């Protein structure tokens, strides 16, 4: 039975989420501010964290960063009333694994939780933690990246996107596929956060080097290739 921590300062909403999850046979704890949420997270072995972004004592973004520093594999589902691309990018940069905008249907919440728990349970250690393509190399255990022996600093979501591309070189990846496989969400054509992250990656992976590796296929998606387009 999964143990889930709900961090939400709206006590009525926290109670509704707790009641709904317990009806789905999950065990739950509740914290009403970020500082208490962090304290409980470090003291217990949770399977999943559900956290609002706007919290007293410590906001959800700072909380997420601190949790990921101490427990990098603990999945975090962020809840917020904000829906703009920049807000989602900021949440993902903080290390969030998924993002659900209020108001939401509980069926969608349950579906997101099941996917995150399944993905966390299916994580296995690779025989070799190092992935290499051309002169680009990443270590999926250490979460490090380098090109031509030059270290490249990436945010958690930038690294996750690059890791997926490294697992699928020489293949066009659609925005829908990237949204589902990297962000574990359905692609919303009204936002451009995937393009934003591709731009971020290009600035770090390609811009300082002569040979470009990340290319756009107009109308189709993106591809990691050492062949010039």
Image (cartoon, grey):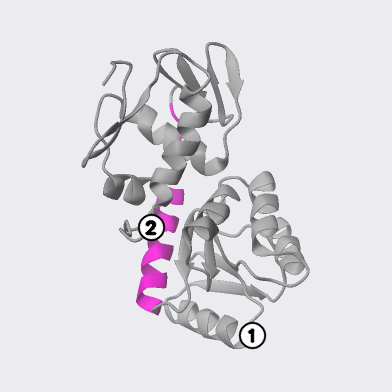
Q: Position of residue 119 (x, y in %)?
A: 41, 50
What stretch of residues is rendered in magenta? Answer: 106-126
Looking at the image, is mark 1 or mark 2 earlier in the sequence? 1
Residue tagged 2: 191
For residue 115, say whether it is visible: yes
For marks 1 and 2, give the CA distance. Answer: 31 Å
Residue at image x 76%, y 62%?
39
- On the picture, is 221 further left or further right than 70? left
Within 10 Å of disc 2 (Cα), the crowding (few <14, some 14-19, many 20+) is some
Q: Which element type, helix, strand or loop, lies under badge 1?
A: helix
Magenta-span inclusion, residue 76: no
* Identity of the residue furthest to the bottom in this view: 12
- How many numbered marks, from 0 up? 2
Within 10 Å of disc 1 (Cα), the crowding (few <14, some 14-19, many 20+) is few
Q: Position of residue 222 (x, y in %)?
A: 30, 35
In the rendered image of this protein, does residue 13 appear above or below residue 76?
below
């Amino acid at each position: 039975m999964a143990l889930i921590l709900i961090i939400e300062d709206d006590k009525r909403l926290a109670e509704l989420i707790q009641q709904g999850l317990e009806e789905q046979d999950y065990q739950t704890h509740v914290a009403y501010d970020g500082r208490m949420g962090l304290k409980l997270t470090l003291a217990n072995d949770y399977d999943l964290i559900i956290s609002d972004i706007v919290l007293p004592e410590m906001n959800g973004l700072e909380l997420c960063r601190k949790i990921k520093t101490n427990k990098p594999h603990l999945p975090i589902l962020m809840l917020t009333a904000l829906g703009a691309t920049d807000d989602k990018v900021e949440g993902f940069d903080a290390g969030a694994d998924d993002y659900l905008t209020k108001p939401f249907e509980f069926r969608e919440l349950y579906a997101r939780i099941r996917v995150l728990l399944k993905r966390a349970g299916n994580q296995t250690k690779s025989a070799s933690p190092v992935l290499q393509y051309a002169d680009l190399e990443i270590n999926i255990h250490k979460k490090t990246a380098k090109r031509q022996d030059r270290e490249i600093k990436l945010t958690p979501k930038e690294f996750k996107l690059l890791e997926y591309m490294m697992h699928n070189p020489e293949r066009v990846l659609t925005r829908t596929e990237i949204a589902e496989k990297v962000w574990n969400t359905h692609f919303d054509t009204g936002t451009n956060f995937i393009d934003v992250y591709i731009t971020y990656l290009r600035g770090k992976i390609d811009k300082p080097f002569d040979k470009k590796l990340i290319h756009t296929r107009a109308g189709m998606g993106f591809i990691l290739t050492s062949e010039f387009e």
